[in-house]
Image: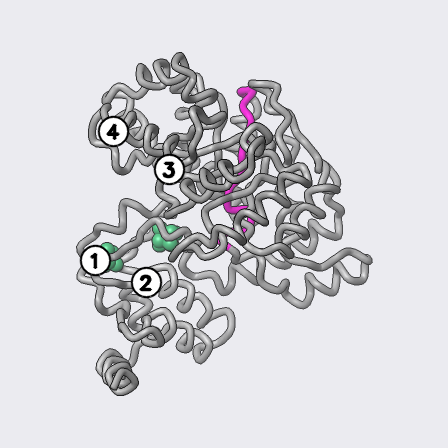
Amino acid sequence: MQYRTDPKSGNQLSTLGFGCMRLPGMPARVNLEETERLILTAVENGVNYLDTAYIYNGSEAALGEIFTRNPGLRQKVNLATKLPIVKCKSSGDFDLYLTKSLERLQTDSVEYYLIHNITSLSTWEHMVELGIVEWIAQQKQAGRIERIGFSYHGPEGEFAPLLDSYAWDFCQIQYNYLNEHYQAGTAGLKAAAERGLPVIIMEPLLGGKLAAELPAKAQTALEEAGINPDPVRLALRWVLNHPEVTVVLSGMNAPEQLAQNMDTAECALPGAFSETEAHAVELAREAIAASYKIPCTGCGYCLPCPKGVNIPSCFNAYNASFAYGRFQGLQQYVTASGAMSGSVHLASDCVQCGACVKKCPQHIDIPAELDTVKRRLQFPGMPAILRFGVKLVAR
Ligand code: SF4
Ligand code: SF4
């Protein structure tokens, strides 16, 4: 495993971090045995950064259980979790959620604590008004938090002012070859590094979108140059090619993914990206941009919808209808509706309550886009037909 130095603390962090947002069995229920095997294999092979969050359903508790089952494991990793500011209405809530996270994780402290999902400078300023700066100082003093940072999903122009608004220890940004100029982007990556901050990267595969097969031209270019044309490898190597990157998080939920990512991280040094790989990325960008209509990463932060709409799956089906054809999109849309499991919820069930909109880190106008999905993938009478079919099967 390669390690990069956290320039603020001197900690040596594995270039591959284990993202715990999509553990085996999630979002329904974490499969503890499979998760334990993955985490143990990762740590045995040198991964020493685990990233979870209060709102990752069951993730913190699963990690806590795994630490308890495996004495000594906790000391081998840098643990990161996050404060759900979307739930914080008063300063007492900061304490409440950190305490719950530590209880779930069965630990007294975390090495890296993040203010989760800052979407604008004013979001942070509101937390400051609630007394978060004083609270952080107390928690550091009490040894419950070692280092404080934030994860960012706001506009490019507000990132540098946010960096300068507080004495941060680290930051976490969305970064991949499609998002060079989106949210913090390359400018934000460089701005953080110039300020001496370690940068943790999330969404290197854009919620799995960059894991899909490469367009034929890109694949051929790589193969002719004798380079492994695997899309995940290409995307991770692109991120790790940047010397400003400290850790790249990957949400691995199968042993083969873990093995592949560890292998990639092992030889992905800054500056190791070849000209052929850079050309393949250009070709992939062009092809993906042509089919990528709604920028949903599938993070699921917008869920649950009170009307049961599976928002990310609707968007995924819509994008698939451009990438792979309308029929494929329609098939995915029917699956997304829940008809196979006996309960139908379609894009047309959205009542535009707006509860999901402020939770979306990609700033998608969800009700409006669901209407777009409906217009492309729903035909008249479809809800009634699906519901009738479900009733028939249930008899
Ligand atoms: S706006 Fe629509 S999709 Fe969003 S939570 Fe409300 S009903 Fe669900
Ligand atoms: S709509 Fe937004 S919050 Fe919901 S899954 Fe997609 S990116 Fe995440």
Measure how far apart labels 1 and 4 are at the Cα level: 24 Å
Label 2, on which residue?
310
Three-letter amino acid code at the position of disc 3: Asn
Disc 1 under 8 Å from ligand 1? The reply is yes
Amino acid beneath label 2: Asn
**Which residue lies under the disc numbered 1?**
306
Local SS, label 3: strand
Q: Which residue is mark 3?
A: 117
Instruction: Pick whichever of labels 3 and 1 is earlier in the sequence.
Output: 3
Q: Residue furthest top?
A: 141
Say which label, 1 or 4, has the lower sequence index.
4
Cα separation between marks 3 and 4: 16 Å
Which mark is first along the chain, 4 or 2? 4
SS for callout 4: helix
Q: Is mark 2 within 8 Å of ligand 1?
A: no
Main secondary structure along the magenta-highlighted residues: loop
- In the structure shown, which secondary structural element does the residue marked by tag 2 occupy? loop
- Vertical placement of residue 198 versus 86, above or below: above
Mark whose residue sits in front, 1 or 4: 4
Q: Is residue 160 visible?
A: no
- Asked if disc 3 and disc 1 are in contact, CB closer than 8 Å, the reply is no
Question: Is 371 covered by the magenta stretch?
Answer: no
Q: Which residue is mark 4?
A: 93
Q: Nearer the viewer, residue 161 or 367?
A: 367
Q: Which residues are magenta?
A: 195-207
* Residue sitting at x 32%, y 71%: 337
Q: Secondary structure at mark 1?
A: loop
Label 1 environment density (alpha carbons within 10 Å; few <14, some 14–19, many ≥20): few
